[in-house]
Amino acid sequence: MYDYWCECGRDWESFNTIEKREDELCICGRKAYRRFRINAKPVVLSYYSESLGANITGPRQKSQIMKEKNVSEVGRVT
């Protein structure tokens, strides 16, 4: 998802692939400018860890479960 704006005052979002290098046009016919999102939400993928026996939804939850089960990551010096 990309945010676009035009000098005519219109703002909108558009779904484009990274490979799409074409310029986006506004409905008024002018060139649209891409706006970068500063407050973009991070993507969190959920997965099941067989070694921990729990569904992990983020690094914070993973470290909390590891503390509860008294385990540490391999190769990490504590």
Image (spheres, rainbow, N blue to C red):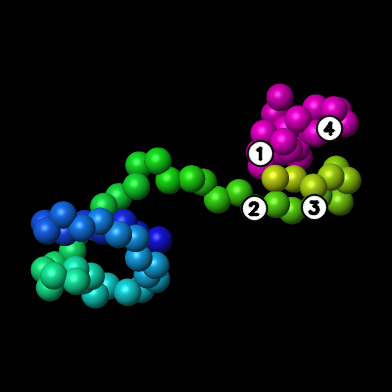
Q: Sequence-wise, which precedes: disc 4 or disc 2? A: 2
The correct choice, above or below, for 78 with respect to 76 in the image is above
Question: How many numbered marks have been drawn onto this rendered protein structure?
Answer: 4
The local secondary structure at tag 4 comes to: loop
Query: In this orientation, does residue 18 appear?
Result: no
Q: Are marks 1 and 2 in contact (CB under 8 Å)?
A: no
Residue hosting label 3? 48
Question: Mark 4 sits on what residue?
Answer: 71
Q: Position of residue 71 (x, y in %)?
A: 84, 32
Q: Nearer the viewer, mark 4 or mark 2?
A: 2
Q: Which residues are magenta?
A: 58-78
- Amino acid type, residue under disc 3 in the picture: Tyr
Q: Considering only order in the chain, which callout, 4 or 1, is on the residue closer to the N terminus?
A: 1
- Which class describes the residues within 10 Å of circle 3: few (<14), some (14-19), or many (20+)? few
Dot 1 or dot 2, earlier in sequence: 2
Distance between mark 1 and mark 4 Cα atoms: 15 Å
Q: Which residue is mark 2?
A: 45
Q: Which residue is mark 1?
A: 59
Residues under labels 1 and 3: Cα distance? 13 Å
Disc 3, SS:
strand
- Amino acid at dot 4: Val
Q: Nearer the viewer, residue 48 or 31?
A: 31
